[in-house]
Image (cartoon, rainbow, N blue to C red):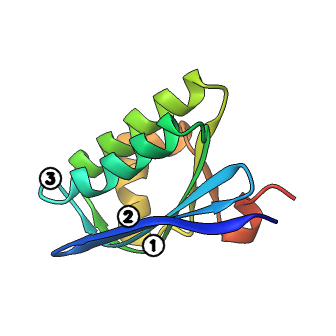
């Protein structure tokens, strides 16, 4: 399996790392995703899509907070990925983050997995 770190970024309360798992981009998000840090996630997601990765797996296992701005970043990436024939898969959301998706109904438009292994194609 082709694995490689594509990039990483860190600003204050959010750290984002992108790596390649075959034809899938795995984006690991650590910290707090809000209107102050949203661009730190938006930019690598868009770069992955521009590079031809239409299947994005977002590892939320260490995401501690997500507000509506962060949710909109993920929704925007989902629309672009689906337009390219792929999708955005969310992994291991903590209850506080999952609650935002539940309240807004956004959980219905994402594929959510319990583990990273479940989200990666076999």
- The image shows residue 111 at horizontal and vertical percentages of 62, 47
Quarter of the figure with residue 88: top right
Q: Are marks 2 and 1 in contact (CB under 8 Å)?
A: yes
Q: Are marks 2 and 3 in contact (CB under 8 Å)?
A: no
Frontmost residue, 69 versus 121:
121
Q: Quadrant of the C terminus?
A: bottom right
The kind of secondary structure element at disc 2 is helix
Frontmost residue, 54 versus 95:
54
Q: Is residue 19 above or below residue 55?
A: below
Observer able to see residue 105: no
Q: Is residue 34 above or below residue 86?
A: below
For the point 55% across and 33% down, which residue is it? 81
- CA gap, disc 3 to disc 1? 19 Å
For the point 76% across and 64% down, which residue is it? 2
Residue bearing the label numbered 2: 97
- The image shows residue 92 at horizontal and vertical percentages of 56, 69
- CA gap, disc 2 to disc 3? 15 Å
In the picture, the disc for residue 60 is: none
The kind of secondary structure element at disc 1 is loop
Q: Residue furthest top?
A: 83
Report whether 80 appears left or right of 23: left
Report whether 73 appears left or right of 122: left
Observer able to see residue 44: yes
- The image shows residue 48 at horizontal and vertical percentages of 50, 45
In the picture, the disc for residue 35 is: 3
Q: Residue furthest right?
A: 122
* Label 2 vs 3, first from the N-terminus: 3
Residue bearing the label numbered 1: 94
Frontmost residue, 25 versus 110:
25
Q: Is residue 49 above or below residue 70?
A: above
């Amino acid at each position: 399996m082709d694995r490689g770190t594509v990039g990483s970024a860190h600003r204050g309360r959010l750290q984002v790392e992108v790596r390649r798992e075959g034809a899938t981009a795995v984006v690991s998000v650590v910290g707090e995703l809000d209107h102050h840090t949203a661009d730190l996630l938006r930019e690598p997601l868009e770069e992955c899509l521009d590079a031809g990765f239409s299947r994005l797996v977002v590892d939320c296992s260490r995401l501690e907070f997500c507000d509506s701005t962060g949710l909109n970043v993920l929704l925007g990436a989902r629309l672009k990925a689906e337009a390219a024939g792929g999708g955005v898969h969310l992994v291991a959301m903590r209850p506080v983050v999952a609650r935002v998706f539940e309240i807004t109904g956004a959980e219905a438009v994402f594929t959510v997995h319990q583990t990273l292994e479940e989200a990666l194609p076999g």
